[in-house]
Image (cartoon, rainbow, N blue to C red):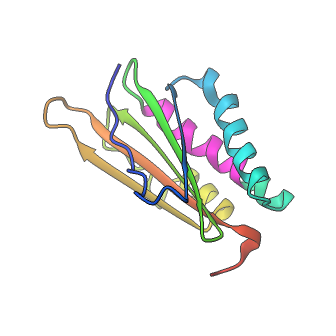
């Protein structure tokens, strides 16, 4: 399996990080949507925000799955801190890609979330990239 760089959890254990690693294949999307939905429900997000988080997770994971190397792993990390759900999904991808601001996926993500970020780092040993898509959703749309 390919190794993906991930965000590191805060050393403060009062704000736990939920992490799930799955194969980077489309059949895992339902598990990832369920994880995001469960965390959002647990943190008492409103129904519209829960739906946005579920759709954003689906879009982020789909974008990484279609670009993933063979046998790649998706590493999904979710953390709720200070009224904000932070989600980061990482995988090893084959190309330096334009998932960026001009793509339809980016427009979908910016409509569903409060912030979106893309990070890609080349792997010097291969021609692949460690790619991470992150998004945040503020509880009840409040700006803290």
Q: What x and y, as percent, mark residue 30? A: 70, 30
Q: Is residue 23 left or right of residue 55?
A: left
Residues 14 and 62: in front is: 14
Q: What x and y, as percent, mark residue 107? A: 59, 59
What is the quadrant of the N terminus in the image? Answer: top left
Residue 91 lies within the magenta run: no
Residues 133 and 77: in front is: 77
Q: What x and y, as percent, mark residue 4? A: 34, 35
What is the quadrant of the C terminus in the image? Answer: bottom right
**Which residue is situated farthest in the right direction here?**
47
Q: Give the residues drawn in magenta, as a range.
A: 53-67
Q: What x and y, as percent, mark residue 42? A: 76, 51
Magenta part, dominant SS: helix
Q: Is residue 138 left or right of residue 47?
A: left
- Report the label total: 0
At 35% from the left and 33% from the top, the residue drawn is: 92
**Which residue is situated farthest in the left direction here?**
124
Q: Vertical placement of 97 versus 138: above or below?
A: above
Residues 85 and 131: in front is: 85
At 49% from the left and 26% from the top, the residue drawn is: 24
Residue 63 lies within the magenta run: yes
Q: Vertical placement of 111 versus 52: above or below?
A: below
Q: Vertical placement of 71 versus 80: above or below?
A: above
């Amino acid at each position: 399996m390919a190794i993906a760089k991930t965000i590191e959890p805060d050393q403060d254990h009062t704000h736990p990080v939920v992490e799930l690693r799955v194969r980077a294949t489309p059949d895992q999307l339902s598990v990832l949507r369920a994880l995001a939905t469960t965390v959002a429900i647990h943190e008492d997000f409103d129904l519209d925000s829960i739906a946005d988080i579920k759709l954003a997770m689906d879009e982020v994971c789909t974008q990484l799955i279609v670009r993933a190397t063979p046998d790649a792993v998706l590493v999904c990390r979710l953390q709720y801190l200070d009224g904000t759900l932070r989600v980061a999904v990482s995988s090893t991808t084959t190309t330096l890609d334009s998932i960026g601001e001009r793509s339809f996926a980016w427009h979908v993500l910016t409509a569903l979330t409060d912030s979106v970020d893309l990070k890609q780092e080349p792997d010097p040993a291969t021609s692949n990239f460690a790619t991470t898509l992150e998004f945040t959703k503020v509880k009840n749309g409040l700006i803290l």
